[in-house]
Amino acid sequence: MTSPISILLYHRFGRSQDPLSTPPADFERELCWLADRGYRSLTLDEFEHGIDHAGSADGSKRVLITFDDGYAELASVAAPALRRYGLNGVAFLITGECPTGRDRGDSANPNLNHISWDDARKLASEGIIEFQSHTHSHARWDPDSDGTRKLERDLATSLDVLSDELRLPRRTFRHLAWPWGLCNERWERLGRSLGFTYQHIVQRGAVTRPGQTIRLPRFCFDGASTRAFRTWMTLLGLPAGAAVCNRIFGTIRTYRQGAGYV
């Protein structure tokens, strides 16, 4: 792949004491930087095509902007900022955390921190944000047979809920972001058997190989300074820079977890 595809990862916005949070003003500056330099944010169909038909030296600058967990700031912060710069994104939802309209009447419900299905349907219909699976419970599964059975039920439930709530065919949901980026080969095979062709982890790097569909590296920019964002994105935009990042951080991840993008 001559032109790397960087996958950006954010979680939430505006929570100053939360390490997973990014100040909205910083997020705005980062989107502005991308737009000013001609980056194009991809839809999932475009992303899949870019992987499957890689190799043309068109010099395009492409990113996939992703959000994990499905916090309420998707509707109040992320979507408005994306609109302002003509960009779009993908949110991986913990489907068991998204409140229904019925839940909105319960102010004590902890799920109110997450985007409602009403708001998700609205954003999806506008084409601003697409929604995919971050599992149903965001649990930590044991890598044994019993844990694998629980994982299978959890993933299947997430597919059912996404399909029912977003009123789309089950086959629409082909992308899975592993909680904490943790996975192994057995879980990856299980995910593929359920229809999750594209599986995302958390790792510094960019997509550089044609046909790569698992362990897709996503660079987490939660709380990163604008300067750090610009530096990393400039590096990842270069084929050689992306390749070096993949090799270094993929090797580190493989050493720690046995499942890195290298």
Image (cartoon, rainbow, N blue to C red):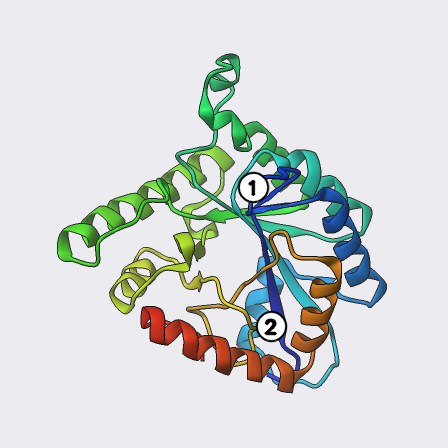
What residue is shown at x 52% (from left), y 81% (from top)? 209
In the picture, measured across the screen, residue 69 lies left or right of residue 124, that is: left
In the picture, measured across the screen, residue 180 lies left or right of residue 188, that is: right
Give the spatial CA distance, label 1 vs label 2: 34 Å
Which quarter of the picture shows residue 14?
A: top right
Residue 3, position in %: x, y? 66, 80
In the rendered image, which quarter contains the C terminus?
A: bottom left
Dot 1: what SS? loop
Q: Residues within 10 Å of mark 2 (few under 14, many from 20)?
A: many
Residue 150 drawn above or below residue 43? above
What residue type is disc 1 on? Asp
Q: Which residue is mark 1?
A: 18
Which quarter of the picture shows residue 46?
A: bottom right
Disc 1 versus disc 2: nearer the observer: 1
Residue 129, position in %: x, y? 63, 46
What residue is shown at x 37% (from left), y 44% (from top)? 138
Residue 244, position in %: x, y? 56, 84
Residue 104 drawn above or below residue 204? above
Which disc number belongs to residue 50? Answer: 2
What residue type is disc 2 on? Gly
